[in-house]
Amino acid sequence: MKALDELTFDNRFARLGDAFSTHVLPEPLDEPRLVVASNAAMALLDLDPAVADTPVFAELFSGHKLWAEAEPRAMVYSGHQFGGYTPQLGDGRGLLLGEVYNEAGEHWDLHLKGAGMTPYSRMGDGRAVLRSSIREFLASEALHALGIPSSRALCVIGSSTPVWREKQERGAMVLRLAHSHIRFGHFEYFYYTKKPEQQAELAEHVLNLHYPECREQPEPYLAMFREIVERNAEMIAKWQAYGFCHGVMNTDNMSILGITFDFGPFAFLDDFDAHFICNHSDHEGRYSFSNQVPIGQWNLSALAQALTPFISVEALKEALGLYLPLYQAHYLDLMRRRLGLTTAEDDDQKLVEQLLKLMQNSGVDYTLFFRRLGDEPAAQAVARLRDDFVDLAGFDAWAELYTARVARDGDYSEAQRRERMHAVNPLYILRNYLAQNAIAAAESGDYSEVRRLHEVLSKPFEEQAGMEQYAQRPPDWGKHLEISCSS
Ligand code: AMP
Ligand code: MG
């Protein structure tokens, strides 16, 4: 276990130089205080969890102090936002403080979000509010606990600094961890600004540091792009299987590592709704829940365009063609597991689709349905769940197919079925209303609810004593919360 001053830095991105990022010092927040820290994320840096409660911890992650070896940089990138190209974006309020190596030899970017103005702030103030920082913290750690690749969050530091959004709020910073903060938009920036040398340098950097195994392939860049396609297909399959709606799938918010990244008005589905739009400024539903699948491919094509200097168009097209079949295979595999099936049959896809249609029509809670389905043997479980459906004849027909399918699947004990299903069907997810409750308390200075919710969500598959209130459908007020996009 390390103390805070024992972290080892190796700032490889900063060494790429001024064409890629700009040196900017963080602008401190007033009266910094620890809101919440993730012990699991602390462990990634070999940090003793006890250091989170020391004053220096809050000072380091609110811009008051810096390690001597840190090299804070604002990265430049661009990207397609809601389908249109924005030529100049970048870290407008976040800074890459440096890259830290842990004892296992992994490196982690320390990225401080809400750290003040940079050359890329455009019209913004460089700040992040407590509300959005808590949401990013909770979501990244909750996704990770569900087994969905995501950037991680070390802590949220609150402050008394006023920040103006629709109303006056308080500034906060979230310390984000990822193996890299390079986005699709980094490649687009150097492609569209016609800087082939930097574009090549960036591609070498990503290949060497993040896809070294692709070096062995006859066409390393193509192998890397294929791997990115595969990782995105898998990540988005997991979003769809667990009901995660990202909300702002612009290419500047897409990680080159295929991890969930840059959290805004995201949501987990309560009732199943394929058309759910979590971002209230997304009037056309470009990033609706079901559209995430084709948008994943759209984003990969935007990246492919930026990679045309290195890879032939034919090869890029072929690699892009892998996305949908891979997505479908991962998705179906996960959904089979959520249904408790261990074998594959041709009609399984239909079984899933029929169920989702019934859930959609009756507004059935997406998370609790699967959890309860695993509580008992299939016949008993469907008999109990039947009450949640309006179209009873439809559900009965599905239930008959399902119980027959389960019977064909294999002969296993009730305990085996429950254990297997509970291991893939969470009891606790980050419902918007739960986040909202925690935020309301935190805004009045009580951080206990954020901390408790984070704890509960760090073991989403394990039933936790006394935590029943986190495993309920939302109350009426919590069903259709408008989550502000300003953050
Ligand atoms: P986002 O929609 O949060 O992914 O941000 C899109 C772009 O706007 C990025 O370049 C951000 O750095 C920038 N941005 C967002 N909010 C702010 C802010 N409050 N101040 C400065 N830049 C911001
Ligand atoms: Mg962003």
Image (cartoon, helix red, strand yellow):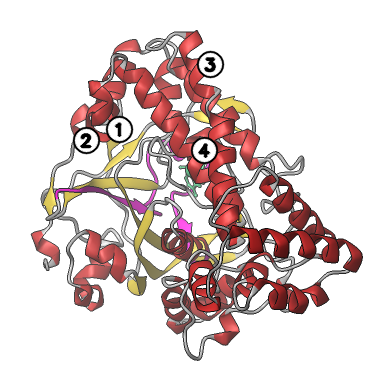
Which residue occupies the foreground of this view, 343 or 349? 343
Q: Earlier in the sequence, mark 1 or mark 3?
A: 1
The residue tagged 2 is 14
Closer to the observer: label 2 or label 4? 4
Q: Earlier in the sequence, mark 2 or mark 4?
A: 2
CA–CA distance in space, label 1 to label 3: 31 Å
CA–CA distance in space, label 2 to label 1: 7 Å
Image height of 418 relative to 129, above or below: below
Image height of 185 relative to 32, above or below: above
Taking the spot 64% from the left edge, 59% from the top edge, the residue there is 408
Question: What's the amino acid at mark 1?
Answer: Ser
Instruction: Characterize the local packing of mark 1: few (<14), some (14-19) or many (20 or more) Cα atoms within 10 angstroms.
Output: many
Taking the spot 14% from the left edge, 42% from the top edge, the residue there is 10
Q: Earlier in the sequence, mark 4 or mark 3?
A: 4
Question: What's the amino acid at mark 3?
Answer: Lys
Question: What's the amino acid at mark 4?
Answer: Ala
Tell me the quarter of the image containing the N terminus. bottom left
The residue tagged 1 is 21
Residue 476 shows in this picture: no
The residue tagged 3 is 317
Name the mark on residue 233: 4
Mark 2 and mark 1 in contact? Answer it, CB < 8 Å: yes
Position in image of residue 329 (x %, y %): 56, 40
Q: Quadrant of residue 328?
A: top right
CA–CA distance in space, label 3 to label 2: 33 Å
Question: What's the amino acid at mark 2?
Answer: Ala
SS class, disc 3? helix
Position in image of residue 94 (x %, y %): 38, 47
Which residue occupies the foreground of this view, 99 or 273? 273
- Considering every residue shown, the one lying at the far bottom of the view is 466
Q: Earlier in the sequence, mark 3 or mark 2?
A: 2
